[in-house]
Image: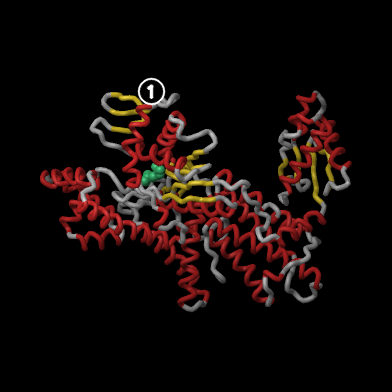
Amino acid sequence: MTDPQLVLTERVQQALAAAFGAEYSDADPLIRPSQFADYQANVAMSLSKRLRRAPREVAQEIADRLTADPAFPGTAEVSGPGFLNIALDDSWIADRASEILADPRTGVGTTTPPQTIVIDYSAPNAAKEMHVGHLRTTIVGDSLARTLEHLGNRVVRQNHLGDWGTPFGMLIEHLLDIGEDAAIARLEAGEGSEYYQEARAKFDSDAAFKQRSRERVSTLQAGDPETMRLWHLFMDATIRYFDKIYSMLGVTLTDEDIAGESMYNPMLATTCADLEASGVATMSEGALCVFPPGFTGSDDRPLPLMIRKSDGGYGYATTDMAAIRYRVNDLKVDRILYVVGADQALHFRMIFAAARMAGWLPDAVSAEHIQIGMMLGADGRRFRTRSGETVKLTELLTEAVDRARAAIAERGYDEATQNEIAHSVGMGAVKYADLSVSHDSEYIFDFDRMLGFTGNTGPYMQYATARIRSIFRRGGADPAAATGPITLGHAAERGLALQLLGFGAVVEQAGALAEPHRLCAYLFDTASAFTAFYENCPVLKEGVDEATRASRLALCALTLRVLETGLDLLGVPVPERM
Ligand code: ARG
């Protein structure tokens, strides 16, 4: 363990137990960064009531216990009304920094035992457009997948595509009307939204088309081979468009990870029958419903989760009930993350509650809705183009790359290099903007801000990383060969080293809480600590003695590794130079 806050937490807990009894060994010592020392422990204030002693006295007793141990790596002093200020020894910080530099995992632990984690993310609908909301669930979900995998877990990516339902009747009939080749070409080009609207318009105005579409739904549901062939044509072309977006973004999602709604079709009848047989679902006004306790509508009446409509049709909830059972029984999950829009919060709370009632979701399995906040336009409303249409994602992503290319145009790179950098910077900007704010908050999609080279942005983080690489290039040194030893002289060296020790803890936290923005904030602080170090502590300059240079190069190498690893866990690419 190298994270100073975790080390101090443990130490103070031991001191608490020694001073006040074993029952205090798991009290939270409330270790926080301090402006007067490295950290402060605030626990004495809250314990004083329970102990009926003055806070300063309690703090003093903890300090005495801490420092009585000759191996305590720092000093502890009481201050103010009962704070405990703790400063760590330089040698301790330097040794831990050398330790994580030598550790191929850079201080990031592994989950023991490893968990099997389903991450349900991206999940666009084939019968509607893939919109910016799906962009965000794709990016956040992908970062969670990378992070949890890096922590040693078995991650099962599940792209719960909306690829089934009654709209497919009219979508297939429209495909027949415009011709297979034309339909495929348009779907591949991302015109699914217009295609859907055309089909819808005919459905509403043309009685014969409506009739054909209805019949097509029946033949589709019956699995008629020719209808299935057409459905596959439609879906394959649509998926090729989704794949274009995935490959532009560089996300780890592949076609193997598609587990769309249609996959659960064969399970839906038994899903309903089993829920009915066990009494979890009951008939209500002709529909089969689960009424999970604690859910009521505005009129105080129990809220139904409808799993079979009165016409016998299945819906979104039926599929999710089948999916949860499949994930628990067949995939043997320990944890399921649903990275889906915040507006579906009620749906998932009801699904989880119903699955618990049915015994399909054991207490040991955690099901979490990772709520994705809405993406807004500059006007603060739902993100759309100026003319009010939804924005085509390939165009949006291409614009990000074009703007990035313009921003670096004057740097004199050859065309191929420029294109490569522009792609990394454009995608990095979009992804980092999604990841750096908490996933459940709404945020404004703003190219100028996300492409800025200062502040907590993708380009800034990429630049900070590329700059360290260039230090090694200029010095003719290999980061892998910069092994120290690390010694600390200047305050900025100490500050940087202390910051770097927290990497493992923040990665674990980002995974445990499913909050990539914590990792972003940490990396941003790391880049800032590096800037302070680099401004104050020359590395390559003449006159720097050899031991100091070796130590500073090692700090550069460790910072580089932390930034590269961290950005990789976010899925943000780093160009070699910028
Ligand atoms: N297709 C859905 C949508 O676009 C998201 C599906 C999320 N996953 C799930 N298991 N319900 O809103």
Coloration of the structure image: secondary structure
Quadrant holding ligand 1?
Answer: top left
Task: Give the side of residue 283 with respect to residue 547, left or right.
Answer: left
Q: Secondary structure at mark 1?
A: loop
Crowding at mark 1 (Cα within 10 Å: few <14, some 14-19, many 20+): some
**Which residue of the protein is positioned furthest toward the left in this rendering?**
208
**Does mark 1's beta carbon lie closer than 8 Å to ligand 1?**
no
* Residue at 46% in and 69% down: 405
Residue 198: where, in percent of width, then height?
20, 51
Q: From the viewer's perspective, is residue 479 above or below residue 326?
A: below
Task: Give the side of residue 526 with respect to residue 193, left or right.
Answer: right
Can the viewer see residue 255 in this picture? yes
Going by the numbered disc 1, the residue's amino acid type is Pro
**Which residue of the protein is positioned furthest toward the top in this rendering?**
300
Say which quadrant the C terminus sits in: bottom right
Residue 187: where, in percent of width, then height?
28, 58
Task: Give the side of residue 169 with respect to residue 475, left or right.
Answer: left
Task: Give the side of residue 577 with respect to residue 475, left or right.
Answer: left
Q: Which image quadrant is residue 317 in? A: top left
Residue 275: where, in percent of width, then height?
37, 30
* Residue at 30% in and 61% down: 188
What residue is disc 1 on? 302
Residue 361: where, in percent of width, then height?
47, 35
* Residue at 65% in and 58% down: 105
Q: Nearer the viewer, residue 398 or 564?
A: 564
Q: Nearer the viewer, residue 387 or 505?
A: 505
* Residue at 78% in and 37% down: 83
Q: Which image quadrant is residue 280 in? A: top left
Can the viewer see residue 440 in this picture? no
All told, the count of numbered labels is: 1
Q: From the viewer's perspective, is residue 179 above or below residue 325?
A: below
